[in-house]
Image (cartoon, helix red, strand yellow):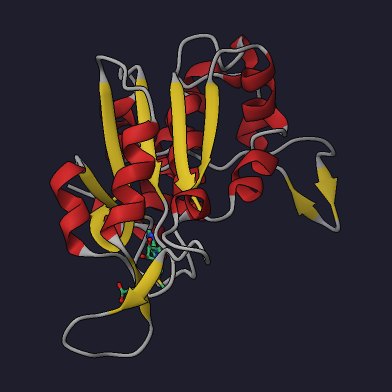
Amino acid sequence: MQFDVITLFPDFIKSYCQFGIIGRAYKEEKIKLNTVDLRQFGLGKHKQVDDLSYGGGVGLILMVEPLFNALKKIPKKEKSKILITSASGKKWDQDFANKLKNEEQIIIICGRYEGYDERVLNIIDHEICLGDFILTGGELCALAVIDSVSRLVQGVLRKEETLEEESFKGGCLEYPQYTRPNEFNSWKVPDILLSGHHAEIKKWREEQAKEKTRKNRPDLVK
Ligand SMILES: C[S@@+](CC[C@H](N)C(=O)[O-])C[C@H]1O[C@@H](n2cnc3c(N)ncnc32)[C@H](O)[C@@H]1O
């Protein structure tokens, strides 16, 4: 999987992708990362990338021309999707990540300032939103896409980092988990988990997962 990210802050993206499972996947070339510095495509002596919004309003927005030119420079693979980050986009979630995991390439444009010239949408597949809040830029959202899709790419996770029992599978959150010691600060691990009764443990986990979903994410309960 190839990720190309157009951003005013390439180091922010590169830095995150050096660590943990994503860093390992990058080093092992299971994923590829190319950052494109939008500033290089800025206009005029000052490499301007933003301007005032027609019709008035506070703040500046990214101009369409630098975005278009930066995008044009990226070699496109056959199976490729172009995303742009936006608080008013479609919510990014596990289903979305699953849909994109079989692409060969995901190109992400990170918005900044007060947003971008809407005409850029002529060359975009999806506007994506990380959640119902306003960030200062799209880089965190781009990293969420890279991280969540990379985990689904064949060979990125090792056996012990399984995808089998995770939150959002079958519309349910993950069950609560515990590790050593059995007791800490008088907080005990539930007896059932120490019982060795696998069928009972499985049942308990399913019930707990349902309970947690009802409590924390009633919107997921069908
Ligand atoms: C300060 S925000 C602009 C917010 C915009 N004026 C609005 O009201 O929707 C700057 C950029 O950060 C990114 N951004 C902000 N919140 C986001 C979110 N929840 N999800 C994805 N990207 C976001 C977008 O790329 C946006 O263009």
Asked whether 144 or 181 is in front, the reply is: 144
Q: Is residue 145 left or right of residue 189?
A: left
Residue occupying the point 54% across, 28% down: 33
Q: Is residue 20 left or right of residue 8?
A: right
In the image, residue 89 above or below residue 33: below
Residue 105 picture quarter = top left
Q: In which of the image's four quarters is ligand 1 placed?
A: bottom left
Residue at 21% x, 43% y: name it: 124
23 is higher (above) or lower (below) than 58 = above
Locate residue 143 relative to residue 196 in the image: left or right: left
Q: Residue at x 36, y 53 (%)?
A: 66
Find residue 81 and report its image quarter. top left
Residue 94: x and y in percent read 34, 37
Q: Position of residue 210 (x, y in %)?
A: 36, 44
Residue 41 sits above or below residue 145 on the image? below
The residue drawn where x is 37% and y is 22% is: 75
- Give coordinates of residue 109: x percent, y percent: 38, 47
Residue 169 coordinates in the image, percent (x, y): 34, 31
